[in-house]
Amino acid sequence: MKKTSVVVFDTKPYDQEWLIKAANGKPINWKFYEFRFEPDTAPSAKGHDVACIFVNDNANREALKTLSELGIRFIAMRCAGFNNLDLDAAKEFGFTVTRVPNYSPYAVAEHTIALLLTLNRKIHRAYNRVRELNFSLNGLVGFDLYGKTAGIIGTGKIGKIVAEILSGFKMKILAYDPVQDQNWAKKVQCHYCSLEELVTQSDIITLHLPLLPETYHIIDQKILSLCRPGAFLINVSRGKLIDTVALLEALKDGKLGGVCLDVYEEEENVFFRDLSEEGLKDDVLARLLTFPNVLITAHQAFLTYEALSDISRVTVENICRFATGQPPLEGTLLTAPSS
Ligand code: NAD
């Protein structure tokens, strides 16, 4: 049987390990590249049948045109979000594109809570202190989550799990989503309200919505000005949901109590890379890192064994299905020539 040749961009050792494991015994030849997929690197897909791309790859029109000219017909995205792919261009060039919309939402929801608890209770600072034999508690005061209000923006798969965990802390739950699930809200005792109402009333605001033209900078200077003094803002969704310059101003004004970010507007140039020798050229990110009440992780919310296993399994299954002319797994198709 002819093997399908798959070129995989933006890979780390753990991606390679899980994809190889998922493809065990299946007719796939892998070519792994550590560099990203973008217009300049797209020609490296030459000679392959399938391109497999990730969250910070740049599948713009120019890069897709190159893939199309190289005869590639299938793009397997091994992520949930697809804001980094020009869907109109993908349709125009007649690609089949799949993604992995349903890999462990628990991974991302639990990381949200990890960030919140770490920053609120200053675990990261306490850990370093204690290792240096400094057992002082000065500056480590946090607050009880019990009885406070959490505002969930976006009550899809991840937002719902975050709401359910926080309701276990006996927090009051508010939510904003243009599509409301009232049955679920009733069960969790969650109250849907407007975005403005949510930000004015919440002690903790957490973002769980996709990046779309209409959600770009949904957290802007106006929304930040409505936040409660001392409020915590958490973003594990997409960096461009927040106007980072406005966020910096709110931090400088002492308006926010804490900011937890797993994503950042310009993360493509920084995240997933070791810059410890090179230094940081992004002044906005450098400034953000100076605030003691800002905690940043580098887009790692998805990084659990379960999520990596789901991502690899769905990606491999869709590659095999494409190779044998079968439709992709339910719910994973973004576009196909006939759609
Ligand atoms: P989902 O599709 O299940 O839910 C998204 C929800 O957002 C939906 O309920 C939708 O109605 C809502 N929404 C759409 N527009 C909105 C708006 N203007 N205001 C408020 N809500 C709006 O998606 P999910 O699986 O819960 O994932 C949410 C996001 O998390 C993804 O889009 C992705 O960007 C991000 N994500 C991040 C990581 C990570 O590792 N950091 C991993 C996976 C997903």
Image (cartoon, rainbow, N blue to C red):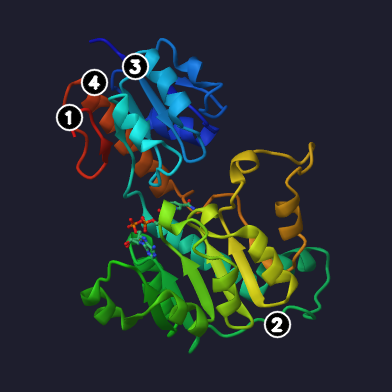
Sequence order check: which comes first, mark 1 or mark 3?
3
- State which mark lies toward you, 1 or 3: 1
Question: In which quadrant is the N terminus drawn?
Answer: top left
- In the depicted structure, whether residue 86 falls above or below residue 297: above
Question: Could you tell me residue 168's position as x and y percent?
Answer: 40, 79
Q: Residue at x 80, y 81 (%)?
A: 138
Distance between mark 4 and mark 1 Cα atoms: 17 Å
Q: Is residue 23 visible?
A: no
Sequence order check: which comes first, mark 4 or mark 1?
4
What residue is pinned by disc 3? 49
- State which mark lies toward you, 3 or 2: 3
SS assignment at label 1? loop
Q: Residue at x 54, y 32 (%)?
A: 13
SS assignment at label 2? loop
Is disc 1 surrounded by few (<14), some (14 to 19) or many (20+) residues within 10 Å? few
Q: Is the residue under label 2 in contact with that under label 3 (CB below 8 Å)?
A: no
